[in-house]
Image (cartoon, helix red, strand yellow):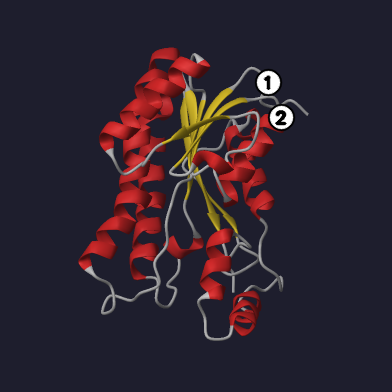
Amino acid sequence: MDRFADRCALVTGAGSGIGQQITRQLLDQGARVVGADLDPAGVPSGAIPLRADVSDEAEVRELVRAAGAELGRIDALFNNAGIGSTANVLDSTVEEWDRVFAVNVRGVFLCTKEVLPQMLARGGGVIVNTASVAGMIGLRDRASYCASKGAVIALTKQIAVQWAGDGIRCNCVCPGTVDSPWVARLTASAPDPAARREELIARQPLGRLGRTDEVAAAALYLASDDAAFVTGTALVIDGGIVAA
């Protein structure tokens, strides 16, 4: 299936987890892809790997310039890079709070700000942001993460409304707990890793963790022509957490 034949995409956070799967599926479906990451060693073969810190304005500007030079244009932007934090408002340091927002929110803002003029000049484009169900519900000990992902959802809707008349669609995916490297680190740091993993599974009505390829497939749907009438949407892929 070549849904993305002749399409050019930029994916941030492409070296692991959901971003790695987005990149892999785009390549499988015919796209040309630049995969950006702080550690681009994990960017799938076939994509053009570039290093970038999405929280740094100068690095994002250079990333978008280099991606444009490699691809010729950027039809689809996947703002996927993100980090987590395990702290409530009393435990969080200002530095930790600011770092989560710098990557999760400012990163989306900076990448969109740099890519959007190119899309507008060509008459359209697609932006897919990676948010989280944490932006919709409260999760214990996830203060900065919940707040940052709520901001991503709100920014997604604002961009969608602002540029809808200019051929721009902007949506976000909201994963639940996904079997990813970040979750692996989270469980490994617990006193009883196996018990912690079972706790995460138990809170999902479908009774299992999500898979990165499932979230990636949802992101690709939002970027595809199949979703031509979809914009401003926060698509939940969570095994039923929000519904419960």
Residue 240 numbered mark, or none: none
Q: Where is residue 174 in the image (x, y as percent from the top left)?
A: 53, 55
Tell me the amino acid under the disc marked 1. Answer: Ala
Residue 148 spot, x, y in % from top left: 35, 57
Residue at x-position 51% and y-position 39%? 40
Mark 1 secondary-structure assignment: loop
Residue most toward the left? 94
- Which quarter of the figure is the C terminus placed in? bottom right
Q: Indicate the quadrant where residue 67 lies.
A: top left
- Work out which quarter of the rendered image holds the N terminus and state it: top right
Check the image and name the residue furthest to the right: 1
Q: In this view, does 22 lie above or below 244?
A: above
Q: Is residue 179 left or right of residue 99?
A: right
Residue 16 appears anywhere in the view: yes
**Residue type pointed to by label 2:** Gln
Residue receiving disc 2: 29
- Judge the density around disc 1: few (<14), some (14-19), many (≥20) Cα neighbours within 10 Å: some
Residue found at x 49% / y 58%: 132
Q: How far is mark 1 from mark 2, CA to CA? A: 7 Å
Marking on residue 5: 1
Label 1 close to label 2 by CB (< 8 Å):
yes
Mark before the other along the chain sequence, 1 or 2: 1
* Whether residue 242 can be seen here: no
Q: Which residue is drawn at 31% across and 44% down?
A: 55
Along the line of sight, which residue is nearer the eye, 129 or 102?
102
Identify the secondary structure beneath mark 2: loop
Percent from the top left, x then y, of residue 98? 25, 58
Work out whether residue 39 or residue 99 is closer to the camera in this orientation and state it. 39
- How far across and how far down the image is residue 233, in percent? 50, 46
Looking at the picture, does residue 70 appear above or below residue 56?
above
